[in-house]
Image (tube, rainbow, N blue to C red):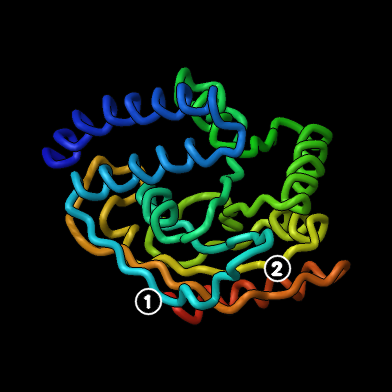
Amino acid sequence: MLRACIYLLFFVPYTLLCSLAAVIGGLFDGSGRVGHACARMWSLGSLFASRIRLEVNGLNHVPPEGPVIYMGNHQGNFDIFALTLAIPRLFSWIAKEELFKVPVFGAAMRRAGYIPLDRSDGRKALKSMKQAAERIASGTSVVIFPEGTRTKDGKLLPFKRGAFLLAAKAGVPIVPFTINGSWAINPRNRLELWPGTISVSFGAPIAVKPGAEGELMEQVREAIAARLEVH
């Protein structure tokens, strides 16, 4: 708990600094590249301060061009930092709309081109999903956690169908990834922080077939589970 508290004393002002840099930089850049660079700086500093190492495997499976949807398991808060550094291309996050209302941080997310998803009711969720699908189809790669929340023990949770409906609407390939080690470093709902290693492994892209969301869900789940160290 002491390590976690000390880390937070660094993390909060550092997050504010990186967010301000993204907001200011975004005024002169509409591509989201400055915001993405600030996110990488934020992630690098956060992992370094927490004494967490990052291992990346399977980068040959990441297409060098064209939009894709990265889908994988969600083990903990540090997944965000690990993926921001592991993915070698410019990409956006699909995040719940509430995060975009956080002062400065929310503005930085918008400057970086991240996509808000309103889940407050069914009609708004469908509208948000349609807008997100259009952004992806037009050339924006995104990251989605199909479990919808973090695991408590490292095991895969049931997948939510919405992520696969979005993939079908966008019509772009899915690149599966598997995260290992994150849940033990920062357990869910506990003020604990342990040094360690987070591993991110990418799998071969999976083609999306309209009307086959159930089959697609199973394919993606199998690809993620194949590299998961806790089954």
Q: Residues within 10 Å of mark 1 (few under 14, many from 20)?
A: few
Which secondary structure lies at badge 1? Answer: loop
Residue visible at 54% across and 22% down? 27
Kindly identify which residue carries mark 2: 173
At label 1, the amino acid type is: Glu
In-front residue for pair 74/56: 56
Q: Which mark, by number, is residue 186? A: none
Pick whichever of labels 2 and 1 is earlier in the sequence.
2
In the picture, measured across the screen, residue 47 lies left or right of residue 142, that is: left
Does 60 appear above or below 37? below
Residue visible at 35% across and 50% down? 78
Q: Do the residues labelled 2 and 1 touch (CB within 8 Å)?
A: no
Percent coordinates x, y for residue 62 in the rendering: 55, 70
Percent coordinates x, y for residue 115 in the rendering: 64, 39
Q: What is the quadrant of residue 64 in the picture?
A: bottom right
Q: Which residue lies furthest to the right in this view?
A: 211
In the picture, measured across the screen, residue 43 lies left or right of residue 100, that is: left
Residue visible at 19% across and 37% down? 7
Residue visible at 37% across and 62% down? 153
Q: What is the quadrant of residue 96 in the picture?
A: top right
Q: Which residue lies furthest to the bottom in this view?
A: 226
Q: Quadrant of the C terminus?
A: bottom left
Which secondary structure lies at badge 2? Answer: loop
Kindly identify which residue carries mark 1: 229
Give the CA distance from mark 2 to mark 1: 25 Å
In the picture, measured across the screen, residue 186 lies left or right of residue 203, that is: left
Does 14 appear above or below 94? above
Percent coordinates x, y for residue 110 in the rendering: 58, 30
Count the labels in the image.
Answer: 2
Percent coordinates x, y for residue 113 in the rendering: 60, 37
Depth-wise, is mark 2 or mark 1 nearer the camera? 2
Q: Which residue lies furthest to the front in this view?
A: 28
